Every structure is written in C-alpha cells, then in structure tokens.
Amino acid sequence: MLRELNFKLNGRPVKLLVKPTATLLDCLRDYLNILSPKRGCEEGDCGACTVLIDGKALNSCLVLGLTVEGREVITLEGILDSDEFGKLRDSFFQRHASQCGFCTPGMIMAAYSFLKSSPRPSRDSVLRAISGNLCRCTGYQSIIEAIMDAAAEVKGAAR
Amino acid sequence: MKDLNYSSPASLDKALAILDECGDRARILAGGTDLIPALRRERLWPDHIVYIGKIKRLARIKVDGKMLKIGPLATIAELENSAVIAKKAPLIRFAAAELGGPAVRNLATIGGNLINASPAADMACALLALNANLTIRSKTATREVPIVNFFKGPKLADIAPNEILAEISVPLDGAGVLSKFMKLGKRKSLAISVVNCAITVKPGDGGLCEKATIALGAVAPTPIRAFDAERLLAGAKITDELLELVAEKAASCTSAIDDIRGEAWYRKRMAGQLVKNGIKELFAGRNDL
C-alpha cells in the first residue's frame, strides 16, 4: 500500500508515493534519481549512503522514507555550489583522495558536515569525522590530507 | 521486507493506544539502527511500524532533583555532546563516544540500545554501572524497573509489545565518583563490542576504594554487574595484589560464548584485564602502585 511522502530535497519540495518499507536511500535512488548516495552495505556499516537530514549526517539506508516527512534532506547534488564543497573537490583532486569513487559521496558528505560544525579541525577530529566511512582503495591517508587541506582553506587556519 | 502499516503518532498517549490495539503485531521505530537491518534480513515480521520520533518530549535530558532524567529518544550524539551529561554523568558520554560511528550516533537512541537488549550493548553497560531506573508505560499502567532486572537474555528484555520505555533515570549521588568506559572491538569504529566494561569508583582517603560498580558486556547472555568483584573493592586499599584478585573475580562472573567476534576464553580473560586496568587507571596518581 503506497503512502504519500512530502519533504524538502536539496532545497526543493518533493512529493512521492512510496511503500512503507522504502528506506530514504531507496526513495532517493529509485524514486528521485538521486544517485550520489550508494548502496554499500545497507545496514549502516559503511557510510556510502551518507546524507544530511536537518543538517545531521545520517546513513540513509537506515532511515525509513516515511520518517523524513516534513524534513530537509541534503545530498551531494545539493551542496555542489557551496564554498565547502568547492574546497573539498579541489583538495580531493589534488590529494588523489578518490580512486574508484564509490565511497566518495559519503566521504564528502561526512567531511562537509564536519567542516560545517567543527571550529578548529585537528587530524584526530578528521579521523573521527570519517570513522563511519569505509574506503577500500585509498588507505584513507589521502582522504584525511584532503579534508585537512580543505579545512585549512575554509577556516583560513594554518594547516 | 513484506508490506506493512505505518503510523507516526505525535503523542505518547496516541502511540500507546496504537500499541495496545496491535499487540505483538507492531514494532516501535525510533532511530532504526537495529530495527531496519532486522526488517531487511526478515528476522522480524511486524504488520505495523509505529514511528515515535515525533514525540519530542521523549527526547529530553534534564536534572530533576537528585535524578538525571533521560528520554529514550535522546540520540547517542546528543548524549555525547550534552553539557548536562558531561557534568552529571560523564560515564554516559564515554560510552556514547564508543558506539557505532558518527552517522549511527546521530540516529541511534539510548532507548533503542536498551530495548534491543544486545548483551554487547554499550549504553546498557554504562547505565548498568550507574544503577539506572527504567520507567515503562503502557496505555493502562506505569511501572518502574531497575536496570539490573531489565535484561532477561540475549535480545530479551522485561518489556511487553504494548509498552514503551518512557524514561531513563540515573541517580546523582556522584560527588567524588570517577568513571571509565572501555570497549574492546575488532576495529576502532563501527564495531560491536567484543567485551565492554563500565566502572565507577569512589576513592576514599589513603588510597582506599570506598565503593565501586563494575558492569561488563558481551561476556554473558545479558550485560552483567560483577558484584563479587565490587565486594572485594568496597572499603579496600588498592594494591596490585588486590587488583589481580578483582580481575579474577570479575572474570569468574562471566559466562562468555564463542561467536564470530571472539572466543569465550579470550572474552573471559579480557573482562578481567579491562576491570584491572580500568581501576588501576582511575586510581593512578592517588596511591603508589
């Protein structure tokens, strides 16, 4: 039995008819063609599906679609014009922080959320910020360096 | 998952009314970090999901006289970042910091951790060491359950399908109490505990331990208190010899099994080690060891 779902996606209102069993990840990928969040583990253990809901980074595979009624969802598609994303995009490129790219949207969303909330990022706090995101390619060091670079740029702080 | 009904009541009374009608055909959804994977793996077959996330008063954290009152919907991240928790019951913050990963902590709730009743539950271990009290409500009744009586077996707790955990109360008699939470896992994040341990101690004069509480997880069918080890510590002077005895006693309280995360002998030994090291660190600088 389909149910109506209304929420805000990347700044615009959307209205869907969804199954109660659909997760937010299902809604984004299968109903809305938002393909940046990935199906990694679908049990909250890899972070490839990370999106922001009301400003908080969450695993969209664990969120039932109907529970985002009236709330604000932001995906990678929605932050492309932001200053933070610009710096992350450049630093990920410079540091080779993306190889196959599968973890990258989730990493960027985690990093974006971190940059938004962290007054004085340190290496330890960067490690913690991405501790919910698995990467099989890079060995993480390039990702950490990229986020540190972006943080320094965004915060105007010394690296 | 098979198809199901979905409700999102805005009040506790409405939620309880729905549960009363549905009985064991309904499941409560809060954060969903345990429920959603269980539904996807078809370990559960509810007809009806009752989402309680809109009941804002269940998310409050406040001090009420000598008790710290925590709503079941307080997320692990909120507990980790709460100034009230840091000041009044830092053990809760220590445990919260170890649970899952950042995105899981933003979603998972303390109530969910208790209701899921995993023997390895991190918040449950901390609350057990803090002698928390649980207020459980149904449409027609309210009852209080000390947490030490709440867990009945792996994933089994003293709560009926038509009941909701409405509040978690922690007694605040903690002046001079030190606490520590230790988690052994196969990795530093996104890990289910292989062994976890929550300790509170009240140091007295002259390197004495006035009293202590020790909770251990993933070493028995439920999170447990190591009462025998606590008794050894009460009123005792902390020495290396005593700590060895305490470690042995703590290990003897356990009844660990082999599973995919670790073997029984290892968990038993680590339980003793965590307790020994934890108490040692808490007393470091207060006497000569």
Image: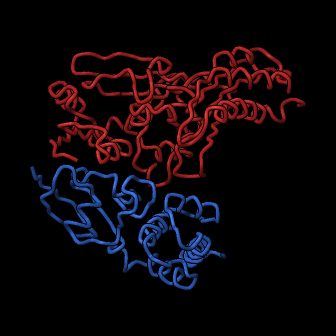
Chain colours: A blue, B red
Residue farthest left in this picture: A1
Residue A143 seen in render: yes
Q: Quadrant of the C terminus of chain A?
A: bottom right
The residue closer to the viewer here, B270 or A34, is B270
Give the left or right position of residue A159, taking residue A19 as reference.
right
Give the left or right position of residue B248, taking residue B47 as reference.
right
Q: Position of residue B55 (x, y in %)?
A: 27, 38
x 54%, y 31%: residue: B125
Q: Quadrant of residue A86?
A: bottom left
Q: Position of residue A54 (x, y in %)?
A: 34, 58
Give the left or right position of residue B192, taking residue B285 as reference.
left
How many marks overall?
0
The residue closer to the viewer here, A84 or A2, is A2
Q: Position of residue B6 (x, y in %)?
A: 17, 42
x 26%, y 56%: residue: A71
x 46%, y 33%: residue: B118
Residue B83 seen in render: no
Compared with residue A40, is residue B281 higher up or lower down, i.e. above or below? above
Give the left or right position of residue B99, taking residue B283 as reference.
left
Q: Quadrant of residue B168?
A: top left
